[in-house]
Image (cartoon, rainbow, N blue to C red):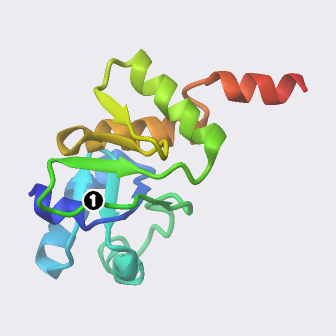
């Protein structure tokens, strides 16, 4: 499962988590490589269009099954037990580190400030990223920006 999940770099969220099982069945029968954990669904970036087609077939009367935004997660080699996040958006990167620390999720950084974490914690890291972007977590950098 981890080797397969390691290549899936493009993630979005289900708006209605009651649709997760139906989506999982549709994806399983389609053969499209995917990863679903809670309301997070990940595919390879090149398969985003395929996922959209599957969503249209599985939910023909509901065009808003997933959020419009995608988060792209750079992936480590599949043989590694670690995953990583590049510091593309420095304020968000620092907020993720603070939230990982607050939630006591193990991670380390290297000299390029890349966050390394265990593959088994990928779902929690994704949840933190989505939580910050959705405003569920109020990191210090958002408070500082609003005070300036």
**Residue matched to label 1:** 76
How busy is the neighbourhood of tag 1: few (under 14 within 10 Å), some, or many (20 plus)? some
State whether residue 56 appears in this view.
no
Q: Identify which residue is drawn at 25% across, 63% down.
A: 23
Label tally: 1
* Residue 144 pos. (x, y %): 78, 23
* Residue 139 pos. (x, y %): 61, 24
Q: Is residue 132 above or below residue 100?
A: below
Left or right of 29, for residue 90: right
Nearer-the-camera pick, 146 or 62? 146
* Residue 34 pos. (x, y %): 22, 67
Q: Identify which residue is drawn at 34% across, 32% down.
A: 108
Q: Determine the image quadrant of residue 123.
A: top left
State whether residue 29 appears in this view.
yes
User: The C terminus appears in which quarter of the rendering?
Assistant: top right
Q: Residue furthest front?
A: 111
Q: Identify which residue is drawn at 27% across, 59% down.
A: 76
Label 1: element kind: loop
Left or right of 140, for residue 47: left
Q: Is residue 67 above or below residue 126?
A: below
Q: Determine the image quadrant of residue 51.
A: bottom left
Q: Identify which residue is drawn at 47% across, 25% down.
A: 99
Q: Is residue 57 above or below residue 4?
A: below
């Amino acid at each position: 499962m981890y080797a397969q999940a390691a290549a899936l770099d493009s993630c979005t969220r289900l708006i209605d988590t009651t649709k997760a099982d139906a989506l999982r069945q549709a994806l399983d029968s389609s053969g499209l490589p995917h990863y679903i954990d809670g309301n997070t669904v990940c595919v390879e970036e090149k398969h985003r269009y395929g996922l959209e087609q599957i969503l249209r077939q599985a939910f023909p009367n509901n065009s808003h099954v997933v959020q419009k935004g995608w988060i792209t997660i750079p992936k480590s080699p599949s043989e590694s037990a670690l995953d990583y996040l590049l510091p593309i958006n420095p304020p968000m990167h620092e907020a993720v580190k603070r939230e990982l620390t607050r939630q006591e999720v193990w991670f380390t950084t290297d000299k390029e400030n890349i966050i390394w974490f265990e593959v088994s914690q990928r779902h929690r890291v994704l949840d933190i990223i989505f939580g910050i972007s959705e405003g569920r977590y109020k990191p210090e950098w958002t408070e500082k920006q609003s005070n300036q």
